[in-house]
Image: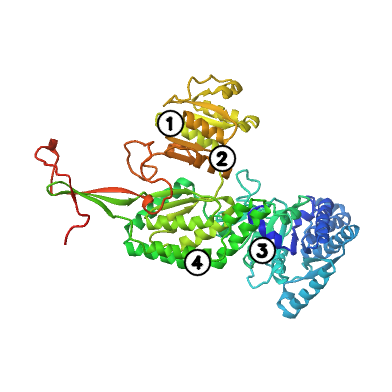
């Protein structure tokens, strides 16, 4: 089950809306096959205990086709030569309604399902007694497993400009479906269309992409709607409006294809089909999916603002975060429980689920630890050492933030809180990448924490990386590591590939891509034989040019052993979407820099936010093991003089005398 569709486990009553383009064929005739498949789906769900209400369009379209035929057979030759069949829409609705309902009745009867008909108008819903009676009647029918079928009574409706009159209660069958979902307290609204869901642009445009989850703040200004449906009044715009209204009233909604024979069943199975509308969707997906580089640059800018604050103001941010966590504990609990339920349904191990769960008292414990951290001595700009280099020339060694931290952590969402608090206390920007199993928990915790950060710092001080890399992007990581600057010490020299890649064509694609870029590819014993490339003479060779070696390994442990035997302990990277394999690699490789799904070329002082570098050390200096606030700091040298110059060290008497850390008053 897709984690974002976990709500379907609680669905009992659903509204299904069928559009005109689903009910009829392109020539206006009834699409009997599609309607038959729809009724079979509803029959199966009805037998499973779901309460189903059907809202259907199509009466006008069917009536139009029938009246055109009637007009044609009753026209004279002169009328046929000058044929302009302008037909009244209300007359079309009156004729088509009986045909539409007769077909539904026939199809359902063949499946031993009883249906009932409701023809309603906007005016009737202004009467509170009508609405009450409507709910009671529908409740009675559903208890008997009868499927009520609703349709706007266009034959007698007084509405003429449905979208220009804001005083209306509903304007078409789409908005009627949304209204009924709220009126009847439905658990889900499914709207069937002639396309798979909502696209970023017209579905006919090859550049348009299906939107799996609608984020109002992101998509309402970005989507370009195409022409409305060939029949009916609504089109996709009306469906989106209805879905948004229902979703923000607490009723999840899905727009999906009515052409598929099992789309409703797939929705109720939690499959990621169609477009989901949910009032909490903005918590699951970032409003704007920033690239990691842009996120890092933004976090760096925000961190500079954070460092410019005085100690008390930074302390207050932590206290505000602690308060915000406690104030939003119930919401955090809801999102965390959804992650736990989804992980249980997906069959995750109990140990992972235990780490994932924010047990009672955890939020209070986290808030308390943040307050303790806030009351600690400010670690930034602490004078670690003072030295008199010469008379009147004082050198200070001070603590200084690194800049931006990138932290990849496992299923524990509480780690996000702890890491973020440490980063703020140490004046650093932060990029976080948590496990997909804690997606909703991480999203709400990130939202709560960043909402407590003052506007002059910016919520983008802490970035949450949520998107998964697809295969082409992972290949691009590989490509960049070799050709971005092949002479650099952090360029890729050896590429180890899992044996399974040789069976799906990806290995050949990767080699071809590298060769196309001008890279000379050598192989180890297995790769050279399989790919028909020259065998390398040594895995220890550092090419520092447009060349590299490829070898095939059985598993991650074999890769780790190869690195320990042949590697330089400089920079090593694993490219995988398997979290456990990545963690095994990150903790198993004993190198100065170990990456997951990122080019080795990122191992650079400037890119790490450290400024210029003299080189990259492969020794074991600085922080190792558990890293607290102190481990997130580096050093800064501050020299205060009175006009001294080096001038070949002439006239300078170096004393190198240690001084007290604080200047006497």
Q: CA distance from mark 2 to mark 3?
A: 40 Å
Q: Is residue 226 above or below residue 483?
A: below
Say which of 293 and 211 sits in front. 293
**x 73%, y 64%: residue:** 173
Q: Nearer the viewer, mark 1 or mark 3?
A: 1
- Label 1: which residue? 568
Q: Secondary structure at mark 3?
A: helix
Left or right? Give the position of 334 relative to 143.
left
Q: CA distance from mark 4 to mark 3?
A: 40 Å
User: What kind of element bears circle 2?
Assistant: loop
Q: Dots 4 and 1: beta carbons under 8 Å? A: no
> Answer yes or no: do the residues labelled 1 and 3 have beta carbons within 8 Å?
no
In this rendering, is residue 537 above or below 296? above
Q: Disc 1 on helix, strand or loop?
A: loop
Give the residue displayed 48% in from the left and 51% down from the top. Answer: 432
Rendered image quadrant of residue 580: top right
Image quadrant where one finds the C terminus:
bottom left
What residue is pinned by disc 4?
364
Question: Who comes first in sequence, dot 4 or dot 1?
Answer: 4
Q: Residues within 10 Å of mark 3 (few under 14, many from 20)?
A: many
């Amino acid at each position: 089950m897709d984690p974002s569709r976990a709500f379907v486990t609680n669905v009992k009553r659903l509204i299904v809306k069928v559009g005109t383009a689903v009910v009829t064929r392109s020539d206006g005739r009834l699409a009997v096959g599609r309607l038959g498949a729809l009724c079979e789906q509803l029959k199966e769900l009805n037998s499973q205990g779901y309460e189903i209400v059907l809202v259907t369009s199509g009466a006008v379209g069917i009536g139009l086709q029938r009246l055109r035929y009637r007009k044609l057979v009753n026209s004279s030759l002169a009328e046929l030569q000058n044929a302009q069949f302008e037909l009244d829409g209300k007359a079309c609705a009156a004729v088509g309604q009986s045909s539409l309902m007769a077909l539904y009745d026939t199809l359902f009867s063949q499946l031993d399902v009883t249906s009932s008909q409701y023809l309603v108008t906007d005016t009737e819903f202004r009467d509170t007694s009508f609405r009450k009676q409507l709910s009671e009647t529908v409740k009675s029918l559903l208890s008997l497993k009868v499927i009520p079928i609703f349709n706007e009574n266009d034959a007698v409706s007084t509405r003429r400009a449905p979208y220009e009159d804001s005083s209306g209660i509903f304007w078409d069958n789409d908005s009627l479906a949304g209204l009924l979902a709220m009126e009847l307290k439905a658990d889900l609204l499914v709207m069937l269309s002639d396309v798979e869901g909502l696209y970023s642009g017209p579905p006919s445009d090859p550049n348009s992409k299906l939107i799996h989850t609608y984020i109002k703040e992101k998509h309402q200004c970005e989507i370009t709607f195409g022409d409305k449906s060939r029949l009916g009044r609504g089109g996709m715009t009306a469906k989106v409006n209805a879905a948004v209204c229902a979703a923000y009233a607490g009723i999840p909604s899905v727009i999906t294809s009515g052409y598929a024979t099992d789309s409703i069943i797939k929705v109720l199975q939690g499959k990621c089909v169609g477009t989901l509308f949910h009032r909490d969707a903005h918590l699951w997906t970032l409003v704007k999916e920033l690239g990691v580089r842009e996120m890092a640059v933004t976090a760096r800018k925000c961190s500079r603002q954070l460092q410019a604050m005085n100690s008390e103001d930074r302390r207050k941010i932590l206290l505000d975060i602690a308060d915000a966590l406690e104030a939003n504990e119930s919401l955090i609990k809801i999102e965390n429980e959804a992650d736990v339920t989804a992980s249980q349904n997906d069959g995750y191990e109990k140990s992972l689920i235990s780490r994932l769960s924010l047990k009672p008292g955890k939020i209070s414990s986290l808030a308390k630890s943040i307050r303790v951290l806030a009351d600690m001595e400010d670690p930034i700009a602490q004078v670690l050492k003072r030295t008199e280099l010469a008379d009147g020339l004082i050198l200070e060694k001070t603590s200084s933030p690194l800049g931006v931290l990138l932290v990849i952590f496992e299923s524990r969402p509480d780690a996000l809180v702890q890491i973020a608090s440490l980063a703020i206390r140490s004046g650093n920007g932060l990029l976080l990448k948590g496990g997909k199993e804690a997606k909703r928990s991480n999203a709400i915790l990130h939202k709560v924490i960043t909402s407590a950060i003052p506007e002059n710092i910016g919520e983008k001080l802490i970035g949450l990386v949520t998107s998964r890399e697809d295969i082409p992007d992972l290949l691009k990581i590989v490509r960049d590591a070799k050709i971005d600057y092949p002479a650099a010490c952090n360029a890729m020299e050896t590429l180890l590939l899992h044996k399974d890649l040789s069976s799906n064509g990806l290995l050949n694609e990767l080699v071809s891509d590298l060769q196309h870029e001008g890279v000379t590819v050598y192989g180890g014993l297995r790769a050279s034989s399989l790919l028909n490339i020259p065998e390398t003479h040594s895995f220890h060779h550092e090419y520092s040019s447009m060349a590299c070696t490829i070898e095939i390994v059985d598993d991650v442990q074999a890769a780790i052993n190869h690195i320990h035997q042949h590697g330089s302990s400089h920079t090593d990277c694993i490219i995988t979407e398997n979290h456990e394999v990545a963690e095994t690699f990150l903790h198993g490789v004993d190198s100065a820099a170990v990456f997951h799904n990122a080019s080795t070329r990122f191992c650079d002082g400037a890119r790490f936010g450290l400024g210029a570098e003299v080189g990259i050390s492969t020794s074991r200096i600085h922080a190792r093991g558990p890293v607290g606030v102190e481990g997130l700091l580096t050093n800064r040298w501050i020299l205060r003089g009175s006009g001294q110059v080096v001038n070949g060290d002439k006239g300078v008497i170096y004393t190198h005398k240690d001084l007290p850390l604080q200047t006497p008053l």
